[in-house]
Amino acid sequence: MEQLVISDFKLGIIAGGQLGKILALTASNWNVNTYILDPDEQCPAASCATVFVKGNHLDFDDVYNFGKKVDMITFEIENINIDALKRLKAEGVIILPDPETLSLIKDKGLQKEFYLKQNIPSAPFHLYASKAAIMAAIETDKIEFPFVQKLRTGGYDGQGVAVINNKNESKKLLDGTSVIEKCIEIKHEISVIVARNHAGQIKCFPPAEMLFNQAENIVEKIICPASTSDAINTKAIELASQIAASLNFVGLLAVEMFIDPENKVWINEIAPRPHNSGHHTIESVITSQYEQLLRAIFNFPLGATDLKMPSVMINLLGEQGFEGKVKYEGLSKAMAIEGVKIHLYGKKHTKAFRKMGHVTVLAQTIEIAKEKADLVKQTLKVKS
């Protein structure tokens, strides 16, 4: 049964960053009132939500009291007080994606165990309780180099991840409960965003290729369609659909994948929310990832995910050496380039590599879109 959307329906969105902002703007097209919970009164979503509620998403009371104000809760981050969500669910508040699913996804160790149980290809791994335990395993040759360390909880935008190539790099190890993964040789990194509603309808967006800033491990470009083969794309969509169905997932799920030199597809991580790799869908796909999330949680029919035009999305990152009040340089020149769509998040303070906005470039071919995206990257700068 579909969720009734009426003039006084209140959708709660936990966290008010750029994802929350764009989701709130999308919900306004359907006359849905949006409530945002965030500790920062100047967060991007505060200016466009119906109601802003100041509070910490990790605090039980803040999350619980917020939940009592709204008819439904969704979120733009995984790191939320789960106990508060579970209590709200027990008291009848609709929370989508489900808190139990969020509990699994926010813990990378539980994610890995889920893939193993479901026979979903993912890098071989071991779980360790501390940095000391990892060091002991290295000393006894129980861990082979190179390997990837991921903190089980709390990581984002490349934080909470360390690549250890040899024993001399052990000083880079992070302290905390961790997943240690075998390094997969990577030919491509792609993302498939999949939506599933209560009725069990599943739709995937076209696979998008992710290119990273290697220094900061932050996505710099999203290319859609990806350069991968039809066979790889079909396999990637099958795996994303399998994960969503196996989790009995309702909402929007971003599935990040590695493609190795033998063209085998490996699952890296999943995120139960709108994702950086789906920003381009606002302009390049018939249904954006944000509208698709709303369709899924309201149990409406899912929208078409056909690509309208090839696109390249670039993140606007704060320039190195600048920190403080935001100043954009080259905005007019970038806007003069045909097919350029600029999104500024409204963050008041910039610093090196902080995500301050994104630009989607549309063109008749992906080669032209790449050339224009490179020009935008050279032209548009975020300074202070």
Image (cartoon, rainbow, N blue to C red):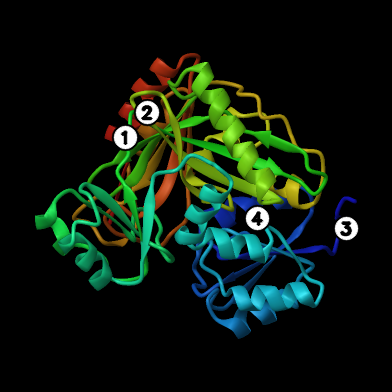
Disc 3 packing (10 Å; few <14; some 14–19; many ≥20): few
Q: Circle 2 sits in a helix, a strand or a loop, which is it? A: helix
Residue at image location 86% in from the left, 59% down from the top: 7
Give the Cα separation between the discs numbered 4 and 1: 28 Å
**Relative image position of residue 128 (x, y in whole percent):** 34, 66
**Relative image position of residue 225 (x, y in whole percent):** 50, 23
Quick check: marks 1 and 2 in contact, CB under 8 Å?
yes
- Residue assigned mark 1: 377
Compared to residue 292, the image places residue 139 above or below, namely below
Disc 2 packing (10 Å; few <14; some 14–19; many ≥20): many
Q: Circle 1 sits in a helix, a strand or a loop, which is it? A: helix
Q: Circle 4 sits in a helix, a strand or a loop, which is it? A: helix
- Is 125 on the left or on the right of 28, as rendered? left
Disc 1 packing (10 Å; few <14; some 14–19; many ≥20): some
Residue at image location 46% in from the left, 24% down from the top: 226
Give the mark nearer the N terminus: 2 vs 3. Answer: 3
Residue at image location 63% in from the left, 60% down from the top: 101
Mark number displayed over residue 24: 4
**Relative image position of residue 260 (x, y in whole percent):** 36, 29
- Residue assigned mark 2: 373
Mark number displayed over residue 6: 3
